[in-house]
């Protein structure tokens, strides 16, 4: 109230029509303020006449600018009343509020006190009420930056996944407003502007200037504000590669390929990286944006540490394994919908990891018996042997082998396709059903008798095919379950100096393995 500079009514409000343009006396401050007409006033609310405080309310600020009202800041940085608050100067803000009510009452000006609920801003950490104040800040002009950033997404130079987020991006960008980039915080990149004490000129520079660029005075001081954290983050795609230097990394890796982040920062971070990338490098910063979902509780709540609705992922990882966690998240990551976390899914993922581990143990255990007969692992599972798969017995490929290699090729194709299109849940499901269902439950069981076949040639061909499929399955599962697959892969013979499964080529579908007749026939057998 102490900073009020007008009373506003609706222009079509008959009750006040004759009063617009006249003046009223603001109590306590004894200041004459005008009665103005503005269409934002809600005639139904209260008396239909509303006080306007341009320096302490964003809507009133807009009204004030439309009507040329003074902006009187009645507060100080530490939440007290300023000299502009007259007799209330120096009072703590909440005390001042009580005093205002008491004084109005004492002067017989208080008609009634009513409860009134309204939205106020509070600090997200300590819940202190935030007072809006009109202050001088630094702004970045956004429209010219937004236009090319809209166009690159329209033209498909940047793909946004899932596609429904594209519209959200356009909505933000087409309604963009100038960006307030200065913050009154203690941590951040300081605004590179120096104020001259003598002529008030502001010198801006990459390097700290020695004197004012206008009057030459040495009495200059850097602006105490820091940049909005997103102002620094938006430079991330190229700053991390050495920009503004023309580094080898920048030449090689920029523009980057896929940017993965949460959909809630599509505008705050992604849009700004696109704008700044184009502005500073004339190139898009990345080709694809994958916006992942939020993990929610079984009740659909956002996981929050302060509300106690979260889970501790490290604890869950210790209990079920990191691979189980990764598999669970991937298997639920359908684009466009949030993930609902329930305990039973990770148990089933852990069971999947155990299934693979046990399958490997079964193989190595049984291999021991064959090795006793002189066959070596290298001879059955070596990298060169694997590339020659599938292996024939008596110049013939057995039905089970024709079937599993046909399935493997199909699954590899589906996995590649799913990963390329950021459908991670599909990749997880496809690999899961292949590894558990086709490979463990059917193929291993089917060929079990042949593994110890008295006909040595037959046993060896079977073992070779088994290892070839197993190794390929490890590679397609690797992005989702990296630890388990890495460990098992190293238990198989690898080429000299092979360091990691992650450095191996990702499997590609082989058309020559495709065998619809074998798949059909095997399906019939499975149905018996
Ligand atoms: Zn706070
Ligand atoms: Zn100067």
Image: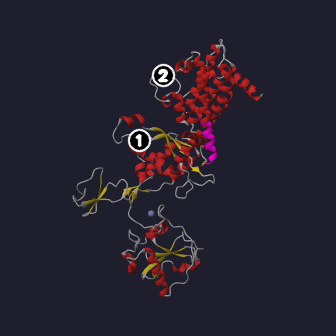
Q: Is residue 13 visible?
A: yes
* Front of the two marks 1 and 2: 2
Q: CA distance from mark 1 to mark 2?
A: 44 Å
Q: Residue at x 43, y 50 (%)?
A: 144
- Disc number placed over residue 282 in the picture, else none: 1
Task: Report the span colored magenta.
Answer: 340-353
Task: Name the residue nearer the viewer: 263 or 495.
Answer: 495
Residue under circle 2? 495
Image coordinates of residue 296 in percent, x first then y, are 59, 51
Q: Residues within 10 Å of mark 2 (few under 14, many from 20)?
A: few
SS of the residue under disc 1? loop
Image coordinates of residue 95 in percent, x first then y, are 44, 77
Q: Residue at x 30, y 50 (%)?
A: 206
Q: Is residue 515 visible?
A: no
Magenta segment includes 345: yes
Q: In this rendering, would 77 be left or right of 196?
A: right
Q: In this rendering, would 53 be left or right of 223?
A: right
- Disc number placed over residue 397 in the picture, else none: none
SS of the residue under disc 2? loop
Image height of 63 relative to 425, above or below:
below
């Amino acid at each position: 109230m102490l900073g009020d500079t007008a009373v506003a009514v609706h222009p079509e409000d008959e009750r006040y029509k004759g009063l617009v343009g006249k003046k009223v006396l603001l109590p306590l401050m004894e200041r004459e303020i005008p009665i103005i007409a503005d269409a934002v006033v809600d005639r139904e609310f209260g008396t239909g006449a509303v006080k306007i405080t341009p320096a302490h309310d964003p809507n009133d600020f807009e009204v004030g600018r439309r009507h040329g009202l003074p902006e009187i800041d009645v507060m100080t940085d530490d939440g007290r009343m300023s000299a502009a608050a007259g007799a209330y100067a120096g009072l703590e803000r909440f005390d001042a509020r009580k005093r205002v009510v008491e004084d109005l009452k004492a002067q017989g000006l208080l008609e009634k006190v009513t409860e009134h609920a309204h939205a106020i801003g509070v600090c997200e950490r300590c819940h202190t009420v935030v007072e809006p104040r009109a202050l001088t800040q630094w702004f970045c002009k956004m429209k010219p930056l937004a236009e090319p950033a809209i166009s690159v997404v329209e033209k498909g130079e940047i793909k946004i996944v899932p596609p429904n987020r594209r519209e959200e991006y356009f909505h933000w960008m087409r309604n963009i407003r100038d960006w307030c980039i200065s913050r009154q915080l203690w941590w951040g990149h300081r605004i590179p502007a120096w104020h001259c004490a003598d002529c008030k000129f502001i010198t801006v520079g990459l390097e700290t200037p020695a004197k004012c660029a206008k009057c030459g005075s040495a009495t200059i001081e850097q602006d105490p504000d820091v940049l909005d954290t997103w102002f620094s983050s938006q430079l991330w795609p190229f700053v991390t590669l050495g920009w503004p230097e023309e580094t080898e990394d920048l030449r090689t890796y920029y523009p980057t390929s896929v940017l993965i982040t949460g959909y809630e920062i599509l505008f705050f971070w992604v849009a700004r990286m696109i704008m700044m990338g184009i502005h500073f490098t004339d190139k898009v910063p990345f080709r694809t944006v994958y916006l992942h979902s939020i993990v929610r509780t079984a009740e659909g709540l956002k996981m929050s540490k302060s509300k106690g609705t979260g889970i501790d992922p490290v604890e869950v990882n210790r209990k079920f394994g990191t691979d189980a966690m990764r598999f669970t998240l991937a298997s639920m990551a359908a684009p466009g919908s949030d993930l609902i976390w329930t305990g039973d899914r990770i148990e089933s993922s852990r069971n999947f990891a155990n299934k693979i581990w046990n399958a490997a143990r079964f193989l190595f255990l049984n291999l021991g018996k064959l090795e006793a007969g002189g066959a070596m692992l290298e001879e059955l599972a070596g990298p060169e042997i694997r590339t020659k798969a599938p292996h024939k017995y008596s110049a013939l490929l057995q039905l089970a082998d024709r079937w599993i290699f046909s399935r493997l090729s199909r699954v590899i194709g589906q996995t590649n396709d799913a990963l390329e299109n950021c459908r991670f849940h599909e990749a997880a499901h496809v690999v899961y059903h292949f590894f558990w269902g086709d490979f463990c439950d059917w193929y291993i069981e089917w060929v079990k008798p042949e593994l110890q076949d008295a006909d040595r040639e037959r046993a060896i061909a079977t073992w070779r095919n088994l290892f070839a499929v197993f190794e390929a399955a490890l590679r397609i599962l690797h992005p989702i379950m990296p630890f388990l697959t890495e460990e098992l892969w190293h238990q198989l013979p690898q080429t000299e100096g092979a360091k990691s499964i992650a450095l191996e080529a990702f499997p590609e579908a082989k058309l020559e393995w495709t065998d619809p007749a074998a798949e059909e026939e095997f399906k019939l057998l499975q149905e018996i």
